[in-house]
Amino acid sequence: MAHDSTPQKPIVVYGTIFVLLFLPLIISTPLATEILIWTIFGMGFNLLLGYTGVLSFGHAAYFGLGAYSAGLAFRNLEASLPVGIALGVLAPMLLACLIGALAIRKRGVYFAMISLAFAQMLYFLALSPLKHITRGEDGLTQIPTMAIFSLSLGKPLPLYYFIMMTTSVMLFATWRILQSPFGKLLQAFRENEERAKACGYNTTLVKFFSLVISAFYAGLAGALNTVYLGYVPLTTLFWLTSGTMVMMTILGGKGTFLGPLVGVGVFLFLQNTISLFTPRWELFVGAIFVAIILLFPAGIMGTLEEKIAAFRLKREAKLVKE
Amino acid sequence: MAEIPWNIIAMQVFFGIALGCIFVLLSSGMSIIFGLLDVVNFAHGTFAMLGAYAVFVVVSLTGNFFVGLLSAVVIVGCVGMILEFFLLKPLYGKDPLLPLLLTFGLSVAIPDLIKIIFGLIGKPVSYPDTLSHAVTLGPMILPGYRIFIILFTLVTIISLWLFLKKSDLGMIIRASTRDSLMVQTLGINVSRIWTIGFGLGVGLAALAGAIAAPMMSATPDMGVDMTMTAFVVTVVGGLGSLGGAIVGGLLIGLVVAFTAFFAGEYSSVSMFFCMALILLVRPRGLFGEQGRE
């Protein structure tokens, strides 16, 4: 992965937004909405795993905390849409600061274990000791329908386009982050942490910020999920939510700009299709994931980029020969 | 809080140690695998679940619990070695996160396979008759099966220790944990040692699952909680340290038993609090070597 895989020009961003505009014409609107929510989640996760090289197995904590914070704000405080979403983003960022301060120094596998354990702690807290706030296993119900500028988001299409606009902003923001010196630094760490350290950069601090930014995305996705469902299921905090995110990102291609979108789309499509035949979709998805790790660890977009790069190299070699 | 009779406290200590023994078996396997292969086995609890199902199948076929325990270790150990040989071997020397991700994939897929074969509902495993009696010790009544767990774990850990310290194979395993390249240079097939080590570690997980089966019955989804416990114990005890796995396992067992008694709601949360505390006070874990974390 020596080549720089981020697009230099924002044409990819505009192109993607253009496609997203017409997505509800191709697939059902709820599925399209779900893809967008998970894509936001995935872009943040990819920033951490794909571009910084830090594997978190506990991103359900940020997603779920975002979902619950927004849900509680809407339901108990009668907060407006922006206020609820802001709370849904802030709380996970604070949590990320806490977990990051405790564990981001650890080497890869160790951080993966610790992040998973903390997420599971949050899950069990919401399940039982904090039942009077979170409603335990039932999840948070009776969340009022949100509106933006007196346009109700209760209907599928307005909701889709609201979430699509948010996704577009986040796509652009991600592109900007990756172009910025900070983004280049993240990738430098992933490629060679020792060298970046030797150049005088504080690797711990950069990893820490990457985690907090990633929690921002996850919290935003969680809050939007609450707006979309009108309900916060306890499974938002469950370990399988983190696991699903890991699978989606690897599937799409970690460290590629469009990887999260592609990974989320393919994963949800697979899940929906297999569910038609059998309730045991996890067996197939898990097996597919194992096969991908063995055969195409670069994922769909990563493998595609490798192929294109190899093709270009060949063509250049040919030109030089002539 | 009102005064609590000391015999109740002593009972909780006893229950905590018995529970901790299961955690010790589980985490020592995890520790061996990590030390030897540098692999965090996400499917560790899944193998424990397979051990519980193996004991269920063998007990219903033969009617003997002890045969069941032994065959659970052998069956799951072999499954582990096959999986290591075909799935994990191709990943060594690549990105260190890949084996973790691969075993995660297994932990998603295997429980569903078990659901297809055995159904969604858990399978009960009955206590062996000889161990279902309770022992009265002064004012305390100690269930026989839990005494068995403690004694059995003691014997297993001592034999494991003797195996690693005294036998030739154990010595090779310890040497490979230190420096596998050097062992390779001496003309030993390290790749085979890795397979054996993985089988050993997974076999210990199976033993933990099998021995826990009569108390909680075998369910397809029991694996994740056991993986999580193994992670917590490993972080508390120190990654890749057998002594850490033992002390960490007993400590977490006691913590869970006491919170279950005094504040039942928090029993699942307490071990994570314990882990956070250890991370604050002693980041490398109780027995961890500096720099390995």
Image: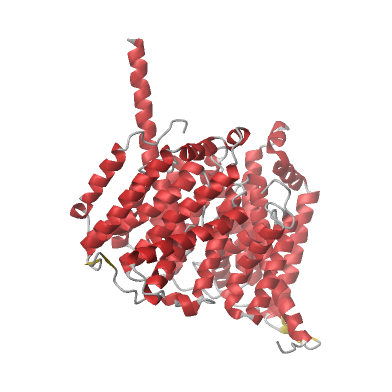
In the picture shown, does residue A283 fall above or below B291?
A: below
| Extreme residue toward the top, this view | A322
Query: x, y (%) of residue A281?
Result: 37, 60
> In the figure, is residue A4 to the left or right of A122?
left
Can residue B110 be spotted in the picture? no
In the picture shown, does residue B208 fall above or below B91?
A: below
Residue at the spot x=34%, y=30% of the render? Answer: A308
Query: x, y (%) of residue B75?
Result: 58, 58
- How many numbered dots are placed on residues in this image? 0
Quadrant for the N terminus of chain B, please.
bottom right
Quarter where residue A115 is shown = bottom right
Residue at the spot x=49%, y=67% of the render? Answer: B220
Q: How is the image coloured?
A: secondary structure
Along the line of sight, which residue is nearer the eye, A307 or B204?
A307
| Extreme residue toward the left, this view | A25
Residue at the spot x=60%, y=75% of the render? Answer: B267
Along the line of sight, which residue is nearer the eye, A19 or A180?
A180
Along the line of sight, which residue is nearer the eye, B212 or B104?
B104
In the picture shown, does residue A282 fall above or below A135?
A: above
> In the figure, is residue B131 to the left or right of B209?
right
Quarter where residue A277 is shown = bottom left
In the picture shown, does residue B263 fall above or below B54?
A: below
> In the figure, is residue B133 to the left or right of A113?
right
Can residue A120 be spotted in the picture? yes
Along the line of sight, which residue is nearer the eye, A94 or B69?
A94
Query: x, y (%) of residue B137?
Result: 80, 85
Query: x, y (%) of residue A317?
Result: 37, 17
